[in-house]
Image (tube, rainbow, N blue to C red):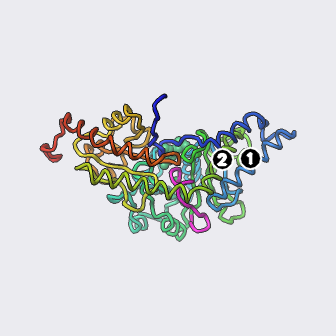
Amino acid sequence: MNKKYIYLDNAATTPIDPRVIDVINQHLKSDYGNASSLHSLGLRAHETLENSREKVASLINAVKEDIIFTGSGTEADNIAINGVAYKNKNRGNHLITSSIEHHAVLRPFQELEKQGFKVSFLPVDKFGLIDLEELKETITNKTILISIMFANNEIGTIEPIKEIGEIANESDIIFHTDAVQAFGKIPIDMNDLKIDMLSASAHKLYGPKGVGMLYMRNKGKKEGWGTYCRPIMFGGAHEMGYRPSTENIPNIAGFAKAAELAKEEMDSDNRKLKKLRDKIISSILENIEDTYLNGHPTKRLPNNANIGFRYIEGESILLSLDMEGIAASTGSACSSKSLEASHVLLAIGLKPEEAHGSLRLSLGRFNQESDIDYLLEILPSIVERLRKMSPLNKNMAYNVK
Ligand SMILES: Cc1ncc(COP(=O)(O)O)c(C=O)c1O
């Protein structure tokens, strides 16, 4: 691509940090040993694996023994949800999640429903927050798992994770959180939070695709993890048997480098990102009429701006921006290829036509203020042009049948 491309779709995936690429390349060339082999090359790969585990654990103040590497965030979610459900099915068959989870969480729960589990999908308020009182009321003596995402991938809302952990802990229920959007983006301290299991994915924090991790708190029980989660894949003894398969050492080392950089640079990255995010939000809301913010005004990820534009489709804005060299999104990458309105935007109370009129701009470490200035310069005329062509003009109120 010759023209400068402005990438504002960092919630879908991030570009790989060049410092991470260096680490991956180095391991691709020299660390091809199998981490289970007993010769020196194998031992070196094993050492890289364990050092990487330490670095990834350190980002969330966890111990390395509580981390397993997986092939993705989706895989971590599936191991946690299915593993806990099947391990604990003699204790109860009730599971709780929210209605705005990523499909990597929603779909396993839907499958478990088909297997006889009862799942409560908690609603959210207009900002995307679950209600803690409702969570307490939903718990029964058959509840074995609560899985609520740390931060939402579409609207950026950050859930009350500390409080949810306390509620789960009081009732002796396993608490899993899909932290794929939060890990490496906002501070997470496992000593401060009563989270039993947490999923993350390297490609959201400037690391490679195809590697993730699952944190599993040992809970101090005699037999450790095996007491509350069983494996769902079977093979070798890799990753304590929870993710049997030869470890992808270059990608895992890249993930560890990305986590190390996130730890060092999170504060400075976030100062910049919040400023840019707020500039996007305030400028669009002030300068383009009939626009509104989706998600919580303050409890939101530093890099997420999700804006609703009345009378036009987010998809048309996205395509027009793409022609001008700007990448944006209308929702999560997988649902943006479907014609269905986003389940997240519907859950916060938007009408389907409003949900179709939303645009997600997600920032990253490599964005500059000049990128945002360019976006804000061209967006008003794009919106004006699309509104002129739109059959949904202002006079046609949404409630007209
Ligand atoms: C909240 C959330 N969970 C899970 C995933 C899936 O992660 P992966 O692409 O690593 O499977 C994503 C990716 O978009 C996500 O945003």
Residue 399 colored magenta? no
Q: In this view, does 228 lie above or below 243?
A: below
The reply to whether residue 367 is visible in this rendering is yes
Q: In this view, does 312 lie to the left or right of 27?
A: left
Tell me which secondary structure the magenta stretch mostly adopts. Answer: loop
Mark 2 touches mark 1? (CB < 8 Å): yes
Q: Is residue 283 left or right of residue 143?
A: left
Residue 184 colored magenta? yes
Frontmost of labels 2 and 1 is 1
- Nearer to the camera, 11 or 211: 11
Residue designated by label 1: 49
What is the residue that sits farthest to the top in this orientation?
2
The amino acid pointed to by label 1 is Leu
**Horizontal and vertical percent position of residue 41:** 83, 38
The reply to whether residue 108 is visible in this rendering is no
Residue bounds of the magenta highlight: 179-194
**Horizontal and vertical percent position of residue 154:** 41, 48
The amino acid pointed to by label 2 is Phe
